[in-house]
Image (cartoon, rainbow, N blue to C red):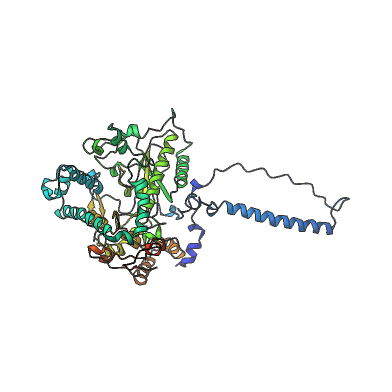
Amino acid sequence: MPNEKDALEIINDPANFTATPEYLEPEETEAAAPAPKSNEPSKKEPGGFSRRGFLKVGGLTAAVASVGGAGAAGFAIGRSDDAYTGYNRTYQGGDMFFNREPFRTDLPTFFKPVGKVERPDWTEYLFQRKAVIMGYIKEGTWTPDKGLKALPGPVGNYYRSRPKEEFETMMKALENSVIRAEAWKAGKHKRYAIADAYNASFRDTGMYNRYGSTVPEDPAEKYEQTGVPVPPEEWDYRHIWRKEPLKFKSPKHATKLIKRMAHMYGMSLVGITKFDPRFMFKGLMRGMPNQGHDTWGDKVPEHWKSIIVFGVPMYWDSTYSAVGYSTSFDAYFRSRCASGLLERFIQELGYPARAQFPGHHYEVMMSPYVQLAGLGEYSRAGVVMVPELGANFRPAAVITDIEFEYDKPISVRMADFCMKCKICADACPSGAISKSDRPETVIRGFKRWRLDEEKCHLQWCSGPTSDGLGCRVCIGLCPYSRKNTWIHTISRELEPRDPTHLVSKGLLAMQTNFFKYPEAEEFKSDWDGGKEANYHKAPWWMRSDDFFEIERTWQYHGME
């Protein structure tokens, strides 16, 4: 029986080193020809060096060599990711440090169909449903007191085909939104003043400030401004000025350049996969009347051939302080902006491109494409986990017709870990996350852990800040959502290579025994029966009573 390697041997094995991604390396250039050797005298000649002279020159040469060595070292250091002040690791691709190549696979985990695969309808997108309901209420077409039976259109049909509890939960979410706003005015604005201002700086300048931001441009807003439909065959080509697109030398060159640009636009991770229409919404197309709900059907634009997927994490310390001190908008804003920049870059090369970006500017479901592009795996909480960031990953994408060298999915056994770990499910304030050992529910042809999105949304609407808009407890508590420290590096590298599963068992035991989690109910707002508890205490720069003349009437919960 061969000797088994211990942890340090595995980590130090060159076979397991993470190679610099090919798209970050410069093109090879022809090596310079070696300098011709000088004629060296075989013996001392007139004008030659004496031993003493040789030693003098040797000492000088050594000194010069030392300076030269320092210069060479300085040059090498200058090429490192960390030397690019202001544009370091992230922009150089250094955040994407996990070597995915040994774990490439044909299908992502839990991606083998077990039934008829069906495309999602637009009514399966919760925020599209909510927007329609809010529109009815605003117009007076329908009000909650009329009940589900009177709710018109496809959204009414959707809820009538579902368990009645789902509609009741949506109505409760709308009710809690009103209560939350009243609580905010009554005094919550003091405790969460800094956290809310940080959130609003992204929300109101680029996320939801309609017509106030041009990065990225959105066809839905164009239609609202002009009343003229903007089909993808027009919108996706709008900035192209070349008669013919610049021809890439090969799909490999296209991949290398576009991935590099995604990093240059500030994205931590990037992957590229073939466009798969199975994960495109039916009846949804921005730029068309009523978002295409009535007219678009199941059409797929012919030029949608490839999809580039990328993203960044939310800020770590505030994410660990969910609910009240966290926000998705810091990451959403960055990935959103990058999608607009990359969309424009591709169109400038002569190719059609269409950005898919947060908050609700999508024609596709993002999660399947993140998996197909080889960035991560499906999780119990319904979000994708990636090796470098865990569940703390906020993606965007650009669809184009460029032919790429596609990435394959990965299987690093994060989903296997989810089958053992139920930390997110136990801590979920709304009880939205499944506690079943394995995925059991067949959704559009695939087995999944079913996330009760109505309950999840209810918690979103019940947060303590001015807009609610998110919970993120499941992300902050996930054992994979940890900063890049040595202990998590060891865990990240060992777990997918451990056939005994002892690593995952040890990690899970350490996580549950060494770290204290609030009870699920304690995460809720105090007006909703909770304590507004946190896994970690609020970051120092979000504690408003430390900066303003505010009397603190609350306690900070969680670890420092």
- 344 or 117: nearer the viewer: 344
- Tell me the quarter of the image containing the C terminus: bottom left
Residue that lies at the very extreme toward the bottom in this rendered image: 513
Q: Quadrant of residue 30?
A: top right
Relative to 418, 444 lies left or right: left
- Tell me the quarter of the image containing the N terminus: bottom left
* Place of residue 490 in the rendered image (x, y in percent of width and height, measured from the top left): 45, 64
* Place of residue 536 in the rendered image (x, y in percent of width and height, measured from the top left): 36, 65
Relative to 282, 408 lies left or right: right
- 512 or 359: nearer the viewer: 359
Q: Quadrant of residue 325?
A: bottom left
* Place of residue 213 in the rendered image (x, y in percent of width and height, measured from the top left): 37, 42
State the residue at coordinates (26%, 54%): 448
Relative to 50, 296 lies left or right: left
Q: In the figure, 525 relative to 384: above or below?
A: below
* Place of residue 399 in the rendered image (x, y in percent of width and height, measured from the top left): 36, 40
Relative to 16, 284 lies left or right: left
Q: Quadrant of residue 348?
A: top left
Residue 105 visible in the current orientation: no
Q: In the figure, 89 relative to 33: above or below?
A: below
Residue 74 visible in the current orientation: yes
